[in-house]
Image (spheres, helix red, strand yellow):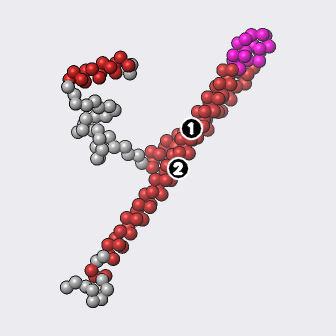
Amino acid sequence: MAWDEWEQLKSAATERGDQQMQLNGLPPGEGGGTGGGRGDLKVSEADLAAVGDHAFKLHGRLWPEARTPVARSTGRAADDLVGKSFALGGALRHVAARWDKQLGSLMDACAHISNHMDFTKKTHKDDDEHIKRNMSSIGVLDRGFDESYAPAGKKKT
């Protein structure tokens, strides 16, 4: 959004007499907010696994499919151009080096996503198990406060 467009929107809101501006959201009752509405983010373990799996597979394909076939022909072309005193040969080498660097960054990002999805799945699974263990022990605590478990002579009548 351009600055001029932003200023026009602010002016229009002021002219309408709106009490406040609302950014990045919907008015209450239209799916925005929290409390079980359509706007709540939900993700399943299967979703996380799918994202991690795709990132892992893409990482494995990137170098052989995006670099290896091009590297030999680009290197030969650059060498040939440099050998014939064309400045374009050095430029082609520079482009190839930048491509390798950018490809490496993309591969790092894919590995990071894949590893993070694995970590997230494990963390949430451990959190869920911890909550389940703690919640199941509440029943044991409740029984301890039940009068039927009171020491002899201390029961209410």
Distance from the alpha carbon under mark 1 to that under mark 2: 14 Å
* Kind of residue sitting beneath label 1: Cys
Give the residue at x 31% y 82%.
149
Is residue 30 one of those drawn in magenta?
A: no
Residue 1 appears left or right of 153: right
Give the residue at x 66% y 28%.
100
**Quarter-wise, where is residue 79 in the image?**
top right
Bounds of the magenta segment: 78-93
Give the residue at x 60% y 37%.
108
Q: Relative to the observer, which residue lies in front, 81 or 4?
A: 4
Residue 110: which disc?
Answer: 1
Residues under numbered marks 1 and 2 in contact, where contact means CB atoms less than 8 Å apart? no
User: Vertically, is 71 above or below 145?
Assistant: above
Can you give x and y, in whole percent of width and height, for residue 46 in the image? Answer: 45, 48
Q: Relative to the observer, which residue lies in front, 131 or 8?
A: 8
Residue 132 is at least partly visible in this image: yes
Name the N-terminal-most of marks 1 and 2.
Answer: 1
Q: Can you identify the residue that label 2 sits on?
A: 119
User: Disc 1 on helix, strand or loop?
Assistant: helix
Residue 65 is at least partly visible in this image: no
